[in-house]
Image (tube, rainbow, N blue to C red):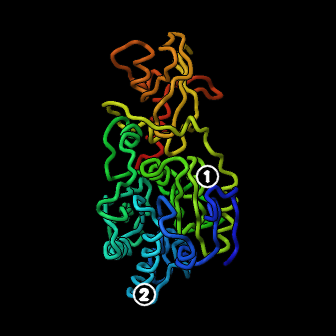
Amino acid sequence: MGVLEKIRKSAAGDLPVDQILQQDCIAAMAALPDACVDMVFADPPYNLQLGGDLFRPEGGRVDAVDNDWDKFDTLAHYDSFSKAWLREARRILKPNGTLWVIGSYHNIFRVGSVLQDEGFWILNDIIWRKVNPMPNFKGTRFTNAHETLIWAAKSEDARYTFHYRAMKTLNDELQMRSDWSFPICSGQERIKRGGTKAHPTQKPEALLYRILIACTSPGDIVLDPFFGTGTTGAVAKRLGRHFIGIERERAYVEVAAERIAAALPLDESATRTMQAPKAAARVAFGTLVETGMIAPGTVLTDLKRRHRASVRVDGSLELVCSRAGGSAGTVETGSIHKLGALVQGAPSCNGWTFWHIEDASGLKPLDALRQTYLLATEV
């Protein structure tokens, strides 16, 4: 059955929960019982089939995807592979579970056709716009600056999980759209071994963060049949979800096991989500939470330190204490704007300037972090 890299004790009977299975994904899923997982997140091979090396203008070689696991002899072979793993994925999904699959123009249309043939019901396609994409060095095409995700239910009448209110709160009280902007993995998030990328297509944790908040609840089981370096597992552990990872390549299994072992789960109170009414901002506060600029559980305060509030996973706040007092026995929650207005007894509030975060240099308004984010993602 291969090597089992156990991350923590199984919490779901005989299922290999919170473990990585070093095995072929189709065989590993075939060994699981029917209707046993709440979500499947899949980042399958893209079948890029790059011809020859690619070089930057200054002569440096581009570290592109040329691994054997991404190579298929024919499109028919790739379609057959897609059909096999998607069929198993649908079988192991609970009746109200959902599938997420990500890909590029090389493969996502073929995968989408196969998943519809297998009975999945497409709910949305999501465009992940990369704010810092790799340029088109040859200058022969448009810069490939996005990838596509398909979100699908097991059937047309499935009562699937979707935390609409949490998504709206995460997006500063605006309805979450189907175009998402995140940077590709770089800097400290990009895992390297021996000075080179541990995996050529590592996905940003912010992307998985949004997906798991949107479509799973604490305690749910998420299966990733192409586990790679364990982004799904690391985010699932942080958010109080369980995972089952399947990965054929031993080198990736070792990196993922180390990464997940180091991931710290959030306090339970920080993983609760809520709804907030209408507001607007150029950058959603939830974006700073998703990208790790502000960690869930961080305590914010006003400039005079009269009120303290804790950040939750969806970008909402929970009042910790307030000199102004409050209703006995109630827990006050809201967006940065709503809770700021509430503690002041005001009709409205600009939460970006009211709430502050403390670092080594002292208190600074949330707006300072927003400006830092804008500068870092400016293209």
Asked if residue 269 is positioned above or below residue 60 in the image, the reply reads above
Q: Which of 254 and 361 is in front in this view?
A: 254
Instruction: Residue 196: give x, y in percent of width and height.
Output: 63, 67
* Quadrant position of residue 358: top right
Hey, which residue is sitting farthest top in the picture? Answer: 324
Characterize the local packing of mark 2: few (<14), some (14-19) or many (20 or more) Cα atoms within 10 angstroms. Answer: few
Hey, which residue is sitting farthest bottom in the picture? Answer: 73
The residue shown at (37%, 39%) is 165
Q: Which of 57 and 76 is in front in this view?
A: 76
The residue shown at (63%, 70%) is 21
Instruction: Residue 247: give x, y in percent of width and height.
Output: 60, 71
| Secondary structure at numbered mark 1 | helix
Residue 140 appears in the figure: no
Characterize the local packing of mark 1: few (<14), some (14-19) or many (20 or more) Cα atoms within 10 angstroms. Answer: few
Asked if residue 64 is positioned above or below residue 174 in the image, the reply reads below
Q: Mark 2 points at which residue?
A: 77
Instruction: Residue 186: give x, y in percent of width and height.
Output: 55, 56
Q: What residue type is labelled 2?
A: His
First in sequence: mark 2 or mark 1? 2
| Secondary structure at numbered mark 2 | helix
Q: Name the residue under label 1.
A: 188
- Dot in front, 2 or 1: 2
